[in-house]
Amino acid sequence: MAEIVVGIASSHTPQLSSGVDMWHDHAERDRRNPQLLGKDARYHTYDELLAVADPALRAELEPAVWDGKYRRCQRAIEALTADLAKADADIAIVIGDDQRELFRDDGIPAFACFTGAELVDAPPAGEALARMPQGIRAAAWAAHGDREQVHPVQAELSAHVAERLASDDFDLTVLRRQPAGRSLGHAFTFPRYRLGLPPATPIVPLFVNTYYPPNVPSAARCHALGRALHEAVRSWDTAARVAVIASGGLSHFVVDEDLDRTVLDALEAPNTQVLQSLSRDQMRSGTSEILNWIVAAGALETRQATVIDYVPGYRTPAGTGAGMAFVRWE
């Protein structure tokens, strides 16, 4: 029987991997973003947010503050890396969202599994690379290799998970071949490049459409999916040590500390009702990646969650940035 031996969750924002000297570049993109999801769960322009922002946020932009927060994040990533290495997992189930990397307008599934033998990470090149903002390019090493990289997939467990989830009335898209010209997304490569998942350890990618309406699943549905995933792993008749990794989040591109702390407190409690009741209006834009964490919480609810650190990474006086969080389940 397969056994889940560790669970971890990590933000994967470029802010973590670009170097603190690039936070100004990330801030410039915020200023140009016409759809910033505010704490009121409505979209705003940068100027609208700045007009109502707390003036105290300017103290969060001091170089020493940025440097201290960046260092905290690196220590938290090192702690998760150590947890993953100690667990010595045979397989890693990675729960993440695709951002038009593998899925595009010809089909964006609410949930998907891949049952082929491997997925390829193809780094941007040519015009795509030239158009990439400086800060994103500086963090690209955490999302892509310097050349095409093959990520092995545990196809048998992927197929088993897909079958069991379908039996539990989850409607899944199942892929056996990677679409030509498309890459495995950064949510799924981040554990390899930043959390030390060994190159030979196969993954089981579980795709959740958090970003693109109208078929974004609810928080309650995501938690139920996690519970079904747990049972699917337990029912796989193969001895294997399995890691569960949630990738992405928390609030961005506007930092919402209250929401982030509500989620983290509910994970630690645990408080399933709070996690399941998060509204669809809140789960939009980058903040929607919290849904990946909720899937993991369902799969890991028999284990105790511990918040390693939470770092509200403000990068403008309007309160934009990323709520960067790091959690383990033991």
Image (cartoon, rainbow, N blue to C red):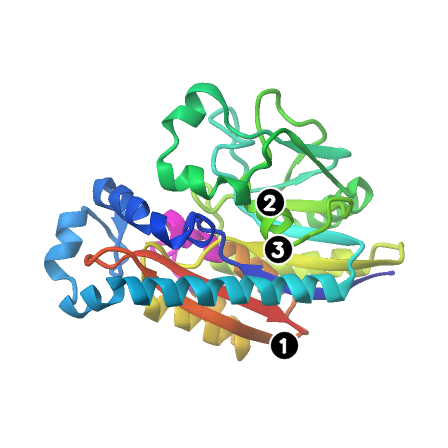
Is residue 289 located in the magenta-colored stretch of the structure?
yes
Inspect the image, locate mark 2, and give the three-letter code of the amino acid beneath it. Answer: Phe
For the N terminus, which image quadrant?
A: bottom right
Inspect the image, locate mark 3, and give the three-letter code of the amino acid beneath it. Answer: Leu
Query: Within 10 angstroms of label 1, few (less than 14), some, or many (20 or more) residues?
Result: some
- The residue lying at 72 percent from left, 62 percent from top is 85
In the image, which disc is placed on residue 304? Answer: 1
301 displayed left or right of 21: right
90 displayed left or right of 185: right
Res. 71 image quadrant: bottom left
Res. 263 image quadrant: bottom left
* Element under disc 1: loop
In the image, which disc is placed on residue 188? Answer: 2
Please report whichever mark, 3 or 1, sits nearer to the chain's N-terminal start: 3
State yes or no: discs 1 and 2 in contact (Cβ < 8 Å). Answer: no
In this view, 198 is above or below 325: above
Q: Give 55 or 220, whichever is nearer the viewer.
A: 55
Residue 134 coordinates in the image, percent (x, y): 36, 37
Q: Which residue is mark 3?
A: 195
Residue 259 coordinates in the image, percent (x, y): 36, 67
> How much space separates mark 1 and mark 2, taking CA atoms?
24 Å
> How much space separates mark 3 and mark 1, taking CA atoms?
20 Å
> How much space separates mark 3 and mark 2, taking CA atoms?
11 Å
Please report whichever mark, 3 or 2, sits nearer to the chain's N-terminal start: 2
Range drawn in magenta: 278-290
Residue 292 appears anywhere in the view: yes
Inspect the image, locate mark 1, and give the three-letter code of the amino acid beneath it. Answer: Gln
Foreground: disc 3 or disc 1? 3
- The residue lying at 75 percent from left, 65 percent from top is 87
Q: Give 315 or 264, whichever is nearer the viewer.
A: 315
State yes or no: discs 3 and 2 in contact (Cβ < 8 Å). Answer: no
